[in-house]
Every structure is written in C-alpha cells, then in structure tokens.
Amino acid sequence: MRFQPPRPKSDDERILPLINVVFLLLIFFMLAGKLATIDPVEVTPPRSASEGIVNVRELVIVIGAKGDLAFDGERIDQASLEGSVAKRLIGDASLQVWLKADSGTDSVQVITIMEILREAGVERLKLLTIPAAIDGAS
C-alpha cells in the first residue's frame, strides 16, 4: 500500500484563522463599543480657560443654538424641564447638574433655564465649555 506524503501547508493556510479572529474582534468592538455620547441637539460650547471632567453620575442639560432643549439625552420642552429635574434630584440631592449651551444661544435664554433649574432645587450648577487657546502659548 502506497501512502502519499502529507502536503506541506502554505503560509496562506496558516494565517487564515488569525485573519478570521481579527475581523471577528473588529466587528465585535465596532458593535459593542461606544466612543462618545451624542447630544440630541447640535451644540458648539463657548470657550473657557478652566477645565473640568464630566462624571457619569451627573445630569447634563443641553441648549441648542435655536433654543432646543435636551435633558438626560432626550429632547424636552422648557415647560416640563423643572419637573423632570426635580424628579431626578429627589433620589440623589448631591447629583451635579451641568448646563451645556451653544455659544450662539441667547444669554437671556440661558439665564431663564438657570432660573428654572434653581426653582427645581438645583443648588450647584456648572457650565460646560471647551478650553480656549491662551494667547502666547505654544
């Protein structure tokens, strides 16, 4: 009985399982990963010299350039903002509230929203801005 000698595997056959695993991992991370939260309203924040980090346990209220409001990632109207914020503060009074307004938003509207938040029970409010380039710095 005559057996044929085993055929040597080519380099392509050895690397194929590795390519399959890499593509499966790539697809998994593309589907499971979340790069950043997306605001429901398009906002370009004003520039600021100070820096801060937003924590997950914080509430973010977004005001768009045209006056659109978003609270907790969903659009909301100005009339129901106070009740929604007050409800969230009942469970955790130490919750930090952030206000992210577009740089083109009318300052009167921003102040009105700040007053609504004060009436809802917000004691400390922080404004989200993006860092400004300091003149003369390299």
Image (spheres, rainbow, N blue to C red):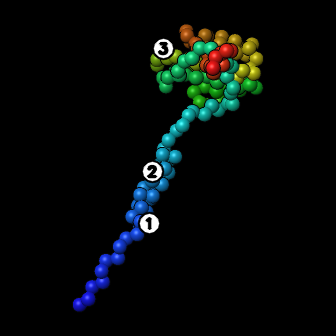
State the SS at label 2.
helix
- In front of the other: 68 or 84: 68
Q: Amino acid at mark 2?
A: Leu
Q: CA distance from mark 3 to mark 1?
A: 61 Å
Res. 101 image quadrant: top right
Res. 119 image quadrant: top right
Is 9 left or right of 53, judged from the image as shown? left
State the SS at label 3.
loop
Answer with mark 1 or mark 2, whichever residue precedes in sequence.
1
State the SS at label 1.
helix
Residue 108: percent from left, percent from top: 75, 13
Q: Residues within 10 Å of mark 1 (few under 14, many from 20)?
A: few
| Circles 2 and 3 in contact, beta carbons < 8 Å | no
Residue 23's disc number: none
User: Which residue in the protein does label 2 denote?
Assistant: 25
Q: Nearer the viewer, mark 2 or mark 3?
A: 2
Answer with mark 2 or mark 3, whichever residue precedes in sequence.
2
Q: Please identify the residue farthest to the bottom as the structure is shown.
A: 1
User: Which residue in the protein does label 3 denote?
Assistant: 93
Q: Residue at x 55, y 9 (%)?
A: 123
Q: Residue at x 50, y 22 (%)?
A: 55
Q: Residue at x 48, y 46 (%)?
A: 29
Residue 12's disc number: 1
Q: Quadrant of the C terminus?
A: top right
Q: Amino acid at mark 1?
A: Asp
Q: CA distance from mark 1 to mark 2?
A: 20 Å
